[in-house]
Amino acid sequence: MAESIEDDDSAYIIKEGDYVVLKRGDIFKAVQIQPRKKVMFEKQWLFLEKAIGQLYSTAFEVVSGGHLEPQKAKTTESSADAKEAGVDNRNIVDDGKSQKLTRDDIETLKEQGLKGQEIIQQLIENSSTFSDKTEFSQQKYIKKKKKKYESTIMILRPSCRILAMMYHGREPGKICHLRYDTLAQMLTLGNIHAGSKVLVFETCSGLVLGAVMERMGGYGSVVQMYPGDGPVQAGLESFGFPPHFHDTLHTFPICHVNALLAGTLDTDPAKELAADSSDASVPSKAGEEAGRTDTDTGGEGGGGGGESSLEEVKMETSTPAQVEQSEREKLKAIRLQEKQEKMEVKRKKLAEAAAQLQGKNADGLIIASRFHPAPVLLGLIKFLAPSRPFVVYSQYKEPLIECYTKLKEHGSKEHGGVVNLRLTDSWLRHYQVLPNRTHPVLQMSGGGGYLLSGTTVDMHNAKAASSQQADKPPPAKKLKLTGSEG
Amino acid sequence: MSFVEYSERVQAGDVVIVYLGHESMMPVKVQAGGQTQTRYGAIRHSSDLIGKRYGSKVTCSKGGWVLVLHPTPELWTVNLPHRTQILYTTDIATITMMLELKPGSVVCESGTGSGSLSHAILRTIAPTGHLHTVEFHQQRAVEVEQEFREHRVAHLVSVRNQDVCRDGFGVAGVADAVFLDIPNPWEAVGHAHTAMKRHGGRLCSFSPCIEQVQRTCEALAQRGFYDLSTLEVLLRVHDVRTVGLPLPHFGPDQSPAPAQSPAPAQSPAPAQSPAPAQSPAPAQSPAPAQSPAPAPVHASLAIKTTTPPRSMAGHTGYLTFATKPRT
């Protein structure tokens, strides 16, 4: 048992370069701590360097110039000074005249350097109706004003919970409107845990990938299957994972899936390397051509090839000195070499990812993308071992109905078969809990997307299997009959 | 087999889930020489299960077949022997994320109950975390401990048979997260505080009644917990169906516009020319044939859709989350 082993603070100190999350009220923003870097948060410019050396979950006051100042021991809610309060709102008239301070007055107060708390006090004193409000209403008023005038910011360590809530609140479009509780269902239904091998296909800015990696804790492996030119992992860095986590992450382009399944995927580095190095020794047109074909196959670095050919043209039109040309050619050779090394690393990585998939023995499959889920699911489920869970997210229900139908139809022909197929969504409601004022929060999310989950099985290879059907009921009925007879 | 690690094949001593058919499963302890009766006949463990690949078919003595599944905490939740009311996967998933559980987390839980949540916690915090679970019912504590051993997760968990409200969790300053599912959680808030790390952590309390939530929130706020958040999460299942929707027939089409088929696209046509009068209006439509189509009988459209179940769990409990500040 971990008896207060890590009781020292060193693990909890905010350091330069850390990925953190700023929190104000219910608003989050993921940023990296960089000295002298201006950060815009909630319409305020901030400098975060003063946070370096402080502890995580510290509350900071934003002072003049956008600098942070650790908040002094939290001044407990000054609701103790309960003065007079009204019984109900029958005497309160909304004539817009109850607040004697004008906008300009408040601005002046701010410029004088008054803290949020003091401004609120001023507002209360200058409100002609405050004392007529009910006690509850007064508290609500103070809470509302606090939100507006107090600029307390908390710096948190990133986590799947916080980032999922942040994306959902700020940029739901970037995560296909995946609500945090739906993501939670995915991780649990997918049985994501340390030591397993999980395939992830997502276009949620890396949030789903990061969530999976957090649950794996750097044990096991994750293969990100990606569409197009490269994997989208923009949100992954916000998790601030230690470097060894990234060693467990492999990426594989789905455009190679068919080749991999057919056994024609060429990832033999030795062969290609030999071809490249022979080209490299001839750093002229031939070399450039080789470079170009590399670009084609790799699908990346196209810009580099184009540039060098442009240079070539320039050089040909103006040849002032032979020396310069040879110099340039040398440079080009180096560049080419670097490029080939890069390609080589890439090829090696592809080979590694392919090796992860080859055995078709992955332990989990998580899909959350803007693509039609049916082809994605049917294409990737083949890489799962039998008796393993898969979870597909879609913002819409209909494509998941199609997935469901196709999985049932194709049965054991296309893949091994599936059981426990379930199409679900979840309903989430928050509550305000206050003495005598507990009720559901007025606004709630209308929907968090849909999930199709199930478990793979192997319907083949059963000796004396009475039927090859994907689902059980028919043999069950037959048996029941014979059973009752006998 | 272990609840925290997959294996490829069934071995003696494993606990497997036998899938009998739609929504019908049962847990089976695999023992050399053992036998399990199902409605499809007997499964002989030595010949039918041991050495089998997880996820494959097993033929029973009467000729029918079942599937042998690798256990997971989610399958266990729907197959475990109930000793108490249990937490289901929807709440468990939300709890796991909101408590920020991950490999290495140290968690305190009370009560253990039937161990539904405990298994899910163990799966998530393995291989380096630890669960301290407190159950005041002696027999339940003994039984769940036995299950942890059988599921090969005993090294990750300490079961204590005591009353959490009186005696606490038996640890201090170690927990990253605390979960309370007891009748009077407000009485355990102080003990939860003690069990948690000095640096802070997350707490969750599950209560079916709003009055419990009320008192718990008051106790939490008093103890300095912040970011209190109470929520409810429900699972909605959509059953995929093909349904036939009969199409109405309004009698033979009297309008000059030709009726080709009783497709739904046709329906606006009668609305546009409701007059049954046989006024020859050739300009109205390029009518190729005047022969009235025979009355379609029993025309219907098959639609692939989903239906909600007739009844569903409309309430399980309120989940209250809070953060403990550093102290």
Image (cartoon, helix red, strand yellow):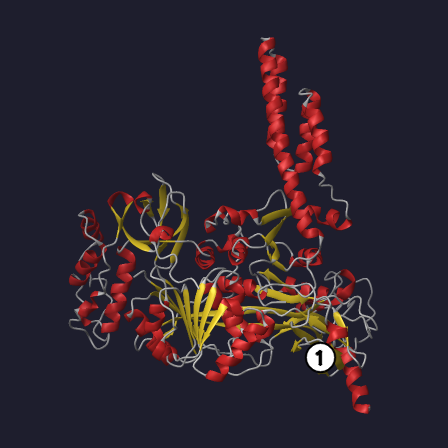
* Front residue of this view, candidates A199 and B287: A199
> At x 23% / y 55%, what residue is drawn?
A72
Type of residue at label 1? Gly
- Check disc 1: other Cα within 10 Å, few if <14, some if 14-19, many if 20+: some
* Front residue of this view, candidates B191 and B221: B191
* Front residue of this view, candidates B197 and B33: B33
Q: Position of residue A340 (x, y in %)?
A: 64, 31
* Left or right: where B215 falls relative to A180: left
Host chain of mark 1: B
* Left or right: where A22 falls relative to B43: left
* Front residue of this view, candidates A322 and A312: A322
- Element at badge 1? loop
- Residue identified by numbered label 1: B34
> At x 39% / y 63%, what residue is drawn?
A3
Dividing the picture into quadrants, the one containing residue A294 is top right
Taking the image as drawn, is residue A125 in sight? yes
Rendered view: A127 above or below B167: above
Q: Position of residue B211 (x, y in %)?
A: 36, 80
Dividing the picture into quadrants, the one containing residue A478 is bottom right
> At x 73% / y 76%, what residue is drawn?
B45
Q: Residue furthest front?
A: B32
Taking the image as drawn, is residue A306 in sight? no
Q: Residue furthest top?
A: A321
